[in-house]
Image (spheres, rainbow, N blue to C red):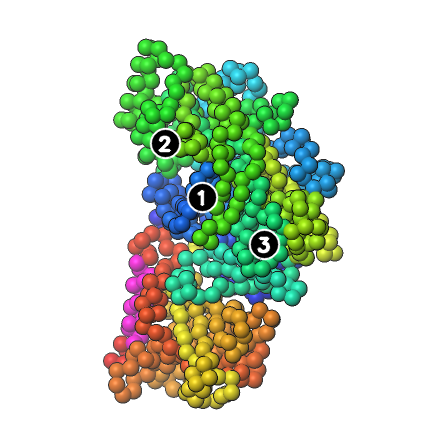
Amino acid sequence: MKKQAKAYLSLPPTEIKPFYDVVVIGSGYGGSISASRLARAGFNVCLLERGKEYQPGDYPDNQVEAAREMQVNMPHKHLGSTTALYEFHVNKDINVFVGCGLGGTSLVNANVCIEPDKRVFDDEAWPREIREDLASVAQGVQRAREMLKPEYYPEGRNGYPILPKTEAMKVAAKALHEEFAFAPINVTFENKINHVGVEQHKCDLCGDCVTGCNYGAKNTTLMNYLPDARNHGAEIFTEVAVQYLEKVNDQWAIYYRLQEAGREKFKAPFLFLKANIVILGAGSLGSTEILLKSKQKGLLVSNLLGHRFTGNGDVLGFGFNNDYVINGVGYGKYKSGGKVEAVGPCIGGIIDMRQKEKLEDGYVIEEGVIPGALSGVLPGVFITVARLLGKDTDANIKDFAMEKLRKIKTKILGAYEGALNNTLTYLVMSHDDGQGKLSLASDRIRVDWPGVGRQQIFKTVNEKLKEATKALGGTYITNPSWNKAMNFDLVTVHPLGGCVMGDNADKGVVNHVGQVYSSDSGTGLHRGLYVTDGAIIPRSVGVNPLLTISALAERSCEIIARDYGKTIPYDFPEVTPSEKTIKPLGLQFTETMTGYFATEEKTDFKKAYALGKNEQSPFTFTLTIVAEDLEKMLNTEAHAAKMAGTVTAPALSPHPLTISEGKFNLFVKDEKDPGKLKMIYNMKLHTLNNREFYFTGYKEAFDDKGFDVWSDTSTLFITVYAGGDSTGPVAGKGILRILPKDFRKQVTTMKALHAANILESAKALKDFGLFFGKSLYEQYL
């Protein structure tokens, strides 16, 4: 597959600075809004996202690609890549699906931008400041709409056809004596350069919204808030997983891991950076997990941390093999005008059943689309599940024959014909009791909620979906795990709560702004620590929650900026579209070296090593070396790459140090002796207490007596200077070496970057290996 030029937003993690005014963790709605608005206010903002950056065209459209982008968190193990896009949390009572990538779950949701029933905010679970000032929430709603640009499906206009799935929903609504309406969705229906300078393609009606929009039509935060943050100076980094926070004097230390870099193979410490303000926007599970880990490390927080988790009353069901054509499976690998009829946005319509006397009895029914990437497995799965769990709603001989014929057609011709082409997906949001609990087990976030699936609302909703399916002449299939044999387990795609708002620490984890309480009671607050995502919502909202999350985040950012003496401008000045680039083939590996270091010896490496060894003064670093452009690295005289990582040196600091501005040069000629080749390391070192050192080191490759290739390429002579560069006084010297066991691990961390396929990956490893081997051959043989 040929690489396409794209307007990438993220920077390599080697560019992370040691300090920012604001560090935002996560890039869903809460995180992206915080980065955008606080950057607009003039703060120096850094955003850290644990997943990868996916641009339109990068999302899976077939079964193999989709499988590669799945990760599963189970009670005692993790399956798949930690940066895979589709993340499943498997629990005993309720399973959770979230997105992992730059844009968070906005990348894989169905874009519905709808306000909750106004009675939701009457609940005293909300802080008084929210309940008594709903105008500020309404203003947040308006500002979110201005950025997210929701629209209704333009049925019959601008070439957009009537969609079979929405026509089926109209039939179901009539049978239920309810109103059908088109839902406001964050999708664009025209080709344009949008309000923040991003090129967007109109909706192609592929239906694959929830596996990622490959056309750029879906208004994820990657299309608006995130590029707006970049336009205003924010620095965005991906594949950086924050672990926990620590208060150090009047600043926050944010400890993080570089994803898929192999540092854990060396048991290396976490990296850190510091900030005055930290905004947690990692989602209900992510933000709660980070605070729980921080609590384990000594951070004082409310005892309600992890409590009041809700799945937003989510229900999944299917009307299988209806008498109506639905076109309910996305295009997948097929393109517009090909084999598949127009599907439409994942959700286009809604049956709004919220106007019940009791708020908790209300819910909304929306139609969905099964992603085309899964089309290959759907026939066998649905026909089997329908036989085991399905309930036919219109059994008679003629209907039985027609249904059988459609099943045969699906078996032979696939998901786009017959029974599956007549299958309607139902997505329901309702109100559960919000009594789930999040906790840590094996250092992972878990959900405990005994008996949640047996709550009456889920029985009521499933009966109503069965009634809707009867109007369509199909077989109703519940969520396959919602049955007696599986303890009526649920699935949610709208996790909320865990760091809920409250009037004080006895009632919540954060206040009305999202600022974290600093004890288990009272109203004391941690200065500079906020949560702005779905974790703060203290109850189910009964609709898709993205607009509620966005409105509260907008409200919080305005107050945060004001509290720090700043103002957020909300205009949209004309911007030049970002330059599109093709990322060159790169290479990365992680290296650990260890040895001894002495502060008393300032001139002689060997004496310093001996003295350090005698005084038990070890020095270890674990560095991830990154060549973003491998061809440039190999073919320029400097052979330069960049580095990120940590140093452990008790003589300099009792805690591990984090590096910045790391530079690595591979096999450059020694200016004083052209017969020697050097590998050169330069980097700044930062302590938790804001002290700074400068590190220089070199390995020498030259042909003297004996066969000493290993010794030369695994021995590093180091000098550390006090201050931020090599002009400061020498703080000490030493010698580091690569141990054979660590070299074996190092080889396993080597991987290609930005490779389009496995052949490109192999080429990167081959090219680097040939250069390395050729350089040594010419030097020694």
Disc 2 secondary structure class: loop
Nearer to us: label 2 or label 3: 3
Which quarter of the figure has residue 634? bottom left
Mark toward the start of the polypeptide (1 vs 2): 1
- Residue 199 at x, y = what percent? 53, 45
Please tell me whether mark 1 sits on a helix, a strand or a loop. Answer: strand
Q: Tell me, yes or no, if residue 702 can be seen here.
A: yes
- Above or below, 654 against 100 in this view is below
Residue 133 screen position, x and y as percent: 74, 39
Region in magenta: 762-776
- Could you tell me how far apart the alpha carbons at marks 1 and 3 are, in whole angstroms? 23 Å
Is 370 on the left or on the right of 279, as rendered? left
Q: Which residue is painted at 39% across and 69% down in the image?
A: 591
Instruction: Tell me if residue 453 comes above or below residue 171 in the rendering.
Output: below
* Callout 3: SS: strand
Q: Which residue is mark 1?
A: 89
Q: Does 265 sit left or right of 312 as displayed?
A: left
User: Residue 505 placed where, x, y %?
Assistant: 67, 48
Q: Amino acid at mark 3?
A: Val
Q: Nearer the viewer, residue 82 or 58?
A: 82
Of labels 1 and 3, earlier in sequence is 3
Q: Which residue corresponds to mark 3?
A: 24
